[in-house]
Image: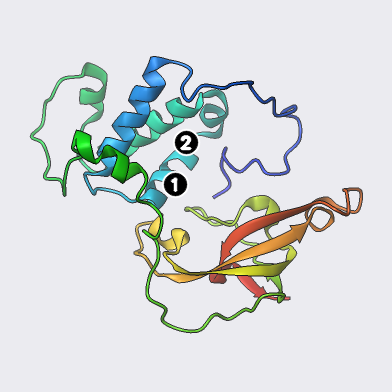
Amino acid sequence: MNGGADLGGMQGFGPVAEEANEPHFHADWEARAMGIVVALGACGKWNIDQSRHSRESLPPADYLRFPYYRIWIEAVEKMLVSRGMVTEVELKSGRLQVDPVEVRGTLAPDAVWDAIHSLAGAADRPEKEPPLFEIDDQVRTLNEHPEGHTRLPRYARGHIGIIVNILGFHVFPDSSGNDLGDDPRWLYQVRFSAQELWGPGKNPNDSVTLDLWEPHLVKA
């Protein structure tokens, strides 16, 4: 979908200012927000792609004005309500009013470190067919604008790039994030020149490399 998170190449937002010695959290509530979202992930009611989609589908005006962890909290509240885990009334009152739903598991304190650092390989799946593309192949991205979740950013649609790496056979977020199952596909690193993405006036030495799935691509 084309939402508030899809800002690549957009102008008018000013420079990105780096904060010297930036802390992990700027307020105590931010650390608590992260803890809540990580703990709720252990319930097994949604996956990481559905979590991303929930954040991206916030109204663009809210997405752009909310601080980072406010986006996390707003998104997880949406998922809690959609899965019947809480009601809107409970969120406002802070009081339990309906019976708890059954969940797959909970996150114990001594398992937090492993939960946060165990994502590597979580999306790998057994290969079902050989990859359609090879390194150095020239490909074009589809120019589609789906209403649901997609990992193909708006600024890169309909452009020509070069395959620079084959990353493996992985869960397809465009399916997983839209509650359509894993539907694993080949994942590639694709390099695009800045001039291809944003015009001949850009630095010819600049490029952008994206991780894109096979359904996003056709041979150029």
Amino acid marked by disc 2? Leu
Q: Which residue is mark 1?
A: 53
Q: Residues within 10 Å of mark 1 (few under 14, many from 20)?
A: many
Horizontal side, residue 102 vs residue 182: left or right: left
In the image, what residue occupies the spot 47% across and 60% down?
A: 174
Q: Secondary structure at mark 2?
A: loop
Front residue of 54/119: it is: 119
Q: Residues within 10 Å of mark 2 (few under 14, many from 20)?
A: some
Q: Residue at x 22, y 31 (%)?
A: 87
Amino acid marked by disc 1: His
Q: Residue furthest bottom?
A: 129
Q: How is the image coloured?
A: rainbow
Image coords of residue 139 (percent x, y): 70, 72
Q: Where is residue 192 shown, x and y percent of the image?
A: 74, 60
Q: Closest to the observer: 214 or 21?
A: 21
Q: Label for residue 4?
A: none
Q: How many marks?
A: 2
53 relative to 166 in the view: left or right: left
Looking at the rendered image, the disc whose residue lies closer to the viewer, 2 or 1, is 1
Q: 71 above or below 126?
A: above
The answer to whether residue 22 is above or below residue 161 is: above
Question: Looking at the image, is mark 2 or mark 1 earlier in the sequence?
Answer: 1
Residue 136, quarter of picture: bottom right
Q: Residue at x 15, y 20 (%)?
A: 95
Which residue is tagged 2? 58
Q: Is 58 left or right of 97, judged from the image as shown?
A: right
Q: Is residue 12 above or below residue 136?
A: above
Percent across and percent down for residue 209 are 68, 56
Along the line of sight, the residue nearer the viewer: 201 or 123: 123
